Amino acid sequence: MNDQADVRSTPSDFANLNRRSFLKTGLGGAIFLGTVSATAGLSGCSSAPAGRVSAVGTRMDASYEFRFLTPDDIQLFGALLPAIIGPGLPEQPQARRMAIAGTIERIDAGIHNFGPANQKELRRLFDLLNFGLTRVTIARVWSNWPKVTTEEADAFLERWRTSGIGLFNNGYIALTKISNVAFYGYEDFWHLSGYPGPPQWAVDALPQFQNV
């Protein structure tokens, strides 16, 4: 499920996303997600951020500290990103794993800067997808995320994209939007979306570019 064609992402897009709600589900959807989140918590699913993750086997930056994503969330995006980004990911296995790991870190950093309302909605969405019962019955994903193939992840995303249920449509949009912004908004991948990078005058004038 490669959304590369309609993405023109820059690093500022995460800030723009914070100004609107990801899951405009209405009262029924909010109650449903809240129930799932509470049930997942009672069933032992932790919502505690992953903190620092070993680079061994994950290709994560061992100095990076996750402040929103849980270990289950990291596995979720590890399964979904190859389907969402598709051919934009490097083909060489090690470079591919590092690109996925870096994108997951940027997803975490971006969500950490979201407002509480969006963070709450995303936590509920991730709990729905990580909780075994709802992963199977609603997402129709039978395996744990680390065992899900790219083809299975793509089929899941397509079901939610084309579903007649708005909750699933908005969940699809949330997952793909934050993933695409985190991937294509990274300098090394700007060229894949056709974004040439900030103009030189902005690089020279704006303080956020001075310490890059």
Image: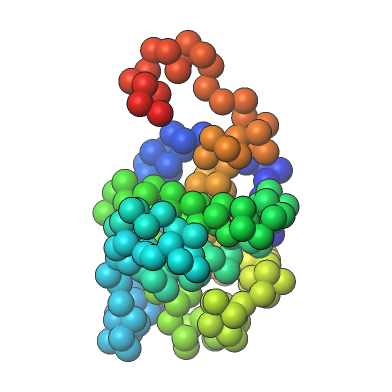
Give how far across and how far down residue 21 sits, in percent.
Answer: 40, 51
- The residue drawn where x is 44% and y is 49% is 106
Q: Quadrant where the N terminus lies?
A: bottom right
- Snapshot quadrant of residue 34: bottom left
Query: Please, which colouring scheme is shown?
Result: rainbow
- The residue drawn where x is 67% and y is 38% is 192
Give how far across and how far down residue 175 sits, in percent.
Answer: 52, 59
200 to the left or right of 86:
left
| Rendered position, 139 above or below 163 | below
- The residue drawn where x is 27% and y is 70% is 48
Q: Quadrant where the C terminus lies?
A: top left
Q: Nearer the viewer, residue 29 or 17?
A: 17
- The residue drawn where x is 57% and y is 37% is 188
Give how far across and how far down residue 91 sits, in percent.
Answer: 71, 54
Q: Nearer the viewer, residue 106 or 177?
A: 106
Give how far across and how far down residue 85 sits, in percent.
Answer: 64, 54
106 to the left or right of 50:
right
